[in-house]
Image: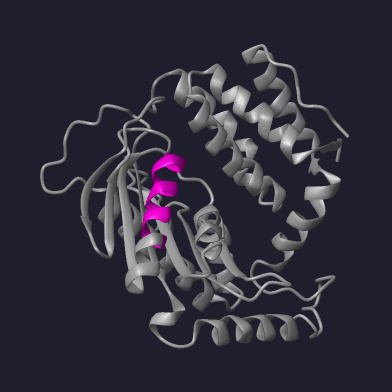
Amino acid sequence: MTGRIEAEALHAWTTQALGAVGVPAEDATLIARCLVDVDLRGVRSHGTRQLRRYIPEFRDSQVNRTPSITVLRETDNSLRLDGDGGAGYLVATRATDGACTKAKQVGLALASSRNHGHVGSAGIYGRRVLSHGLIGWCVAGAADWLLTEDPAATVWDGMKAPPMCFVVPADEGGPPLVLDMNANQFGAAAQAEAAIAAGFGKSVFGSLGMRFISTLLGGILAGSAGAEEPERVYAGATRGFFLVVIDPALIGDADVFRAQVRRIVDESLTLKPLAGAEIAAVPGTLEWRRETEWGTEGIPITEDHRDLLEMIAMELGLDLPRWI
């Protein structure tokens, strides 16, 4: 570690960096909030490190800096949006909020979006669902899937690393259940094959199945324009997003359910940790603890992360955020 940055200072700087390449202030603020919130949870791959990708995309007009999001289709329990080639964070956030509103009204709703850039960590949208006391799951993926031309490729190489997230609300006083994950649990094919040889074939094929599910639902279904695909205006707008939201009151007593989730999570955390782990954890609890602690202490920044921020600052003519 080389130091820490206060979350709000990093948010202000990230907003400024996005604004420097033409992203409107309101949109830059939202995107920056998504990235910094992910940094706060210690999901290092999908926080402000992603600026190394987004800054060139906006600067070179691979992604629309000023999109006009439109409603393609809407019913009492569904919402279909077009992102107009813009950042995935903008349209996925709107889709999530719309689905939550509908689920509160009718019990269950889904939302999907197409024609936009990367949506980032799927947990961003899962946690928005949790803020309404709802259950949710979402996937995202690329709409432009093509068979690899590598003659040495295996079936593992047919899919990339799409995100998925499942969230279950709990009473306050502790973490909810947040399964926020990359569907690719083994990295490259060599690691997957080594895991099969070590007796973990079921886990490998489970991960492969999740990659297909995320890509087919989030990318091909949600990201497609239909039978007549229009010419792509923005080269980086290749993504789709798919979300389902459920009000537990549609099925049972929502208050009792959330209390039970709180009890089950809390009691599970009293068990012994897995071998090699310092503390017992269930999905989302480690990230919740980091978010709580780092919100006060500042976000730890590694040397390579700092180097990246310095490079972007130099490129855009910005000062770095203050270190603590």
Assign the N terminus to one quadrant of the image. top right
Query: Is residue 159 at all visible to an observer of this figure?
Result: no
Assign the C terminus to one quadrant of the image. top right
Q: Nearer the viewer, residue 57 or 198?
A: 57
Residue 168 rendering spot, x and y as whole percentages:
54, 73
95 in magenta? yes
Residue 295 rendering spot, x and y as whole percentages:
78, 49
Secondary structure, magenta segment, majority class: helix
In terms of image quadrants, where is residue 137?
A: bottom left
Q: How is the image coloured?
A: one colour
Q: Which residues are magenta?
A: 88-100
In the depicted structure, whether residue 20 falls above or below residue 149: above
In the depicted structure, whether residue 2 falls above or below residue 287: above
Q: Nearer the viewer, residue 46 or 127?
A: 127
Q: Quick one: which residue is furthest to the top in this view?
A: 317
Q: Quick one: which residue is furthest to the front in this view?
A: 105
In terms of image quadrants, where is residue 175?
A: bottom right
Q: Nearer the viewer, residue 268 or 72?
A: 72
In the depicted structure, whether residue 6 falls above or below residue 76: above
- How many numbered marks are there? 0
Q: Is residue 114 left or right of residue 285?
A: left
52 in magenta? no
Q: Is residue 9 left or right of residue 152?
A: right
Residue 235 rendering spot, x and y as whole percentages:
33, 29
Residue 65 rendering spot, x and y as whole percentages:
41, 25
Q: Residue at x 60, y 28 (%)?
A: 15
Query: Is residue 191 at all visible to an observer of this figure?
Result: yes
Q: Residue at x 72, y 84 (%)?
A: 268
In terms of image quadrants, where is residue 250?
A: bottom left
In the depicted structure, whether residue 214 falls above or below residue 8: below
